[in-house]
């Protein structure tokens, strides 16, 4: 979801709200546009995966910046920690789960809206479909170009001469024939678990399992795992014309063959 919050007194128009990211990411180019020196960065950082396809990303450092959502008469201000990266990106910044948690924000990706509690009521942030589509197209094009470059480099390095299957599409979904159970708690063989492909090589499986266990906070097993979200923020109203008569649809019954198939 694309939003345009105010970060460090600067309005940024290409900020991605990514509920799958465990970090808030700011690009070095954006830092320069904001007039902030790299000397303010802290060096207490560690590499992470997921931003550059297939590679670890090494941040330049961390910085704390104030972030604003809302309007002058109803806004929220919170200080967020950003990991600053030196490679280029199609966005000005990426706001992840730490931002969602700090602002108690709830997204609706279908309607491109973000809602959060404010001092004078619920704050609703939205964008246009055209703006979001343009950003997505640019992001996909950059990711495909980077993935293609990495694939070529890997092929040259490993001397891979295999002819690719022309019928295979890189974006196609091929479910694994066999899966295995992985428990999120490595110290026990009981409790919450996920299924992964059993055909992964040991190195890839270890990376995937470590990633899943490091991001266990993203999984919600029941509503009680998401406390603190007000009902008026999580719910979206259904606008119905006042005075309209409610109509109940007639009961539809399936024939015997369909009932057996659905049962």
Image (cartoon, helix red, strand yellow):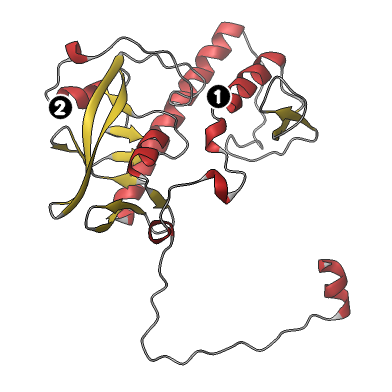
Label 2 vs label 1, nearer the camera: 1
Question: In the figure, residue 262 lies in which quadrant?
Answer: bottom right
User: Can you give x and y, in whole percent of width and height, for residue 138 in the image?
Assistant: 35, 38
**Front-most of 250 and 102?**
102
The answer, for residue 95, to whether it is visible in the render is yes
Question: In the figure, residue 113 lies in which quadrant?
Answer: bottom left
Question: In the figure, residue 101 lies in which quadrant?
Answer: top left
User: Can you give x and y, in whole percent of width and height, for residue 99 in the image?
Assistant: 35, 37
Residue labelled with disc 1: 214
Image position of 116 with respect to 86: above or below: below
Residue at x 43% of width, y 47% of height:
228
Mark 2 and mark 1 in contact? Answer it, CB < 8 Å: no
Residue at x 29% of width, y 46% of height:
3
On screen, residue 187 versus residue 57, left or right, reads right
Packing grade of label 2 (10 A; few <14, some 14-19, many >=20) is few
**Front-most of 219 and 188?**
188
User: Can you give x and y, in whole percent of width and height, for residue 182 in the image?
Assistant: 72, 28
For the C terminus, the quadrant is bottom right
Q: Dot 2 lies on which element?
A: helix
Residue at x 30% of width, y 25% of height:
82
On screen, residue 208 versus residue 227, left or right, reads right
Image position of 111 with respect to 172: above or below: below
On screen, residue 48 versus residue 176, left or right, reads left
Residue at x 59% of width, y 88% of height:
248
Residue labelled with disc 2: 33
**Front-most of 121 and 251?**
121
Q: CA distance from mark 2 to mark 1?
A: 33 Å
Mark sitting earlier along the chain (2/1):
2
Packing grade of label 1 (10 A; few <14, some 14-19, many >=20) is few
The answer, for residue 126, to whether it is visible in the render is no
Q: Dot 1 lies on which element?
A: helix
User: Can you give x and y, in whole percent of width and height, for residue 184 in the image?
Assistant: 66, 28
């Amino acid at each position: 979801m694309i939003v345009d919050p105010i970060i460090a007194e600067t309005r940024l128009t290409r900020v991605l709200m990514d509920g799958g990211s465990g970090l808030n990411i700011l690009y070095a180019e954006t830092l320069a546009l904001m007039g902030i020196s790299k000397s303010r960065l802290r060096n207490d950082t560690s590499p992470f995966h997921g931003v550059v396809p297939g590679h670890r990303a090494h941040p330049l450092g961390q910085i704390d910046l104030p972030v604003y959502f809302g309007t002058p008469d109803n806004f929220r201000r919170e200080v967020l920690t950003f990991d600053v990266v030196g490679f280029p990106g199609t966005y000005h910044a990426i706001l992840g789960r730490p931002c969602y948690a700090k602002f108690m924000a709830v997204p609706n990706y279908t309607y491109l809206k973000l809602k959060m509690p404010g001092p004078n009521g619920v704050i609703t942030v939205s964008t246009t479909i055209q703006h979001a589509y343009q950003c997505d197209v640019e992001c996909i094009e950059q990711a495909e170009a980077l993935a293609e470059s990495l694939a070529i480099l890997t092929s040259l390095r490993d001397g891979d001469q295999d002819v690719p299957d022309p019928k295979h599409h890189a974006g196609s979904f091929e479910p694994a024939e066999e899966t295995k159970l992985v428990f999120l708690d490595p110290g026990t063989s009981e409790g919450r678990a996920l299924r992964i492909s059993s055909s992964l090589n040991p190195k890839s499986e270890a990376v995937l399992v470590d990633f899943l266990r490091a991001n266990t906070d993203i999984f919600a097993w029941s509503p009680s795992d998401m406390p603190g979200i007000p009902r008026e923020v999580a719910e979206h109203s259904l606008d119905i014309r006042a005075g309209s008569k409610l109509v109940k649809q007639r009961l539809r019954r399936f024939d015997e063959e369909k009932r057996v198939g659905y049962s």
